[in-house]
Image (tube, rainbow, N blue to C red):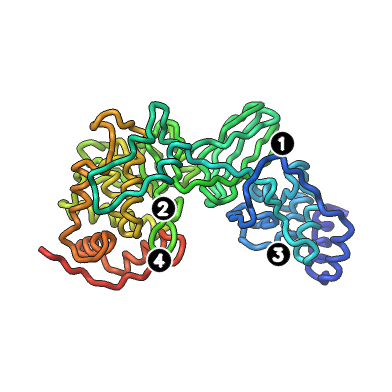
Amino acid sequence: MNKKIISLILCVLIFIGSISTLRVFAEDYEQLNTVNDFDTANNSEVNYGVFKKGDINLDGNIDIADATLLQKCLVSIEQISMIQKCNAIFDNNSLKIDIINVTEIQKYLAGVIETLENPDEIIVYNQMRPEVQSYIDNVTYDETDYTTSNIGDFVSGTSKNIPDGCKIKINKAGKLYVYDGATGGSMVKDSVEGDNYIYNFTPDVVSCYVNVVDGDIDQIGEIKPTGNVRMINSVRTWNVRDLGGWECDGGTVKYGKLFRGGEVSPEDAPILVDYLGIKNDINLRGKREATWTTSPLGENVAFHVYDSYAWYSINNSELLKSILIDIFDSVANNEPAYFHCSAGADRTGTVAFILEAILGVNQSDMDKDYELTCFYSGVYSDAHARRRNESEWIGLVNSFSNYDGNTLRDKVVNWVLSLGFSIDTINQFRQAMINGTPEILTYDVTIEN
């Protein structure tokens, strides 16, 4: 009897079998044991993202279709991707995919076992560098007092604007595939026997790594980073970080939608494009500086550049309107955007300020996001440091004082409305960018001249 006939018989048996039949069949196998090799934090509430054990077809559910697909894979009728294989492996130590894995799904569907996950196998680590974590935790600025800045107390000669990596021990040198649990984005690099470091996972979501040796899976692991500030470790592009993670109106800013930083390099396409999913390169340097016409990140990334630039100022309303149109469209179309200037500080900081104000990020956190650049640039001279108590930043904050509103958010939103945007467009942006339940804004523009 050939493999296709065997597979068809198995599929029919699954679909016509009753729950009681599945229960008896499932109980013929002992539940697989797992070994906890790592110190882990409390994983009682875990966001598994795309890495959901048993979800073989990646539709977000675990049902009979997943068992069927896995059976077809076992008899070579179907092929599954690396992410799908990760979801089919329930014991990271044995790495086997066989009929027992199918049975485990059946046992779960029949209610014999409560979960296919094993939270104790997840490596939990803080991806924020200690000095960054300390700055975020210990500094709260007074929005009515711009005479002080505390960033200099936390930046040292060894500070960097990159995340801490997760150290994993690899048994054999091979190819290391890294998958982000929030987006499914991936990248691959050579692994070495012993300690390896991997970076850039979305915080608070389970991600996965797979080490492949001679074409076979040799090692697999799950990782959950913590820490709200998501800095990105890149090859040559500096000062890169996700705009997500900050508390805002009704929740937190979503990760993976907008990224900010310095000028991009083609060498970082595997990280920025393949892994982070960047589809729009929004260059804020102006055409006199950015004289090229396509993105250095490749032909699959849309390139946006403008006639001039905004440097801590909202005077050029047409320019800023064009920039906001491109950013709003990127978010609405679920096409992650990277907005940047040369250093990722001044022109980038101007646009980030506007976006964060629209989302209702509190003013202290907006100041801190601006000052985070100091972990890249240092604080040893005014030319390098970016401090909240400097005249240019204060000038930007005060630019909106003549617009109606009781809060900075309201004033900035009214300014955006004055550019010709509708309140619906602003609400759609907020809905797409906020992980939670943002307030629906209804007010109209009122400008005090």
Q: Which residue is mark 2?
A: 246
- Cβ–Cβ under 8 Å for marks 4 and 1: no
Choose between 361 and 337: the one closer to the eye. Answer: 361
Residue type marked 1: Asp
Left or right of residue 294, residue 168 in this image: right
Q: Which residue is mark 4?
A: 438
Residue type marked 2: Trp
Q: As displayed, is residue 184 above or below residue 412?
A: above
From the image, state whether disc 3 or disc 2 is nearer to you.
2
Q: As displayed, is residue 132 above or below residue 421?
A: above
Residue type marked 3: Asp
Q: Which residue is mark 1?
A: 218
Q: How many C-alpha atoms fall within 10 Å of the one at disc 4: few (<14), some, or many (≥20)?
A: some
Give the quadrant of residue 58: bottom right
Left or right of residue 446, residue 426 in this image: right
Q: Counting residues from the N terminus, which is met first, the one under dot 4 or under dot 3?
A: 3
Residue type marked 4: Pro
Choose between 164 and 98: the one closer to the eye. Answer: 164
Q: Position of residue 448 (x, y in %)?
A: 13, 65
Q: Residue shown at 70%/38% (left/top)?
A: 217
Q: Which residue is mark 3?
A: 63
Q: Counting residues from the N terminus, which is met first, the one under dot 1 or under dot 2?
A: 1
* Quadrant occupied by the N terminus: bottom right
Give the quadrant of residue 56: bottom right
Query: What's the CA distance linking mark 3 and mark 2?
Result: 36 Å
Q: Secondary structure at mark 3?
A: loop
Q: Position of residue 192 (x, y in %)?
A: 63, 27
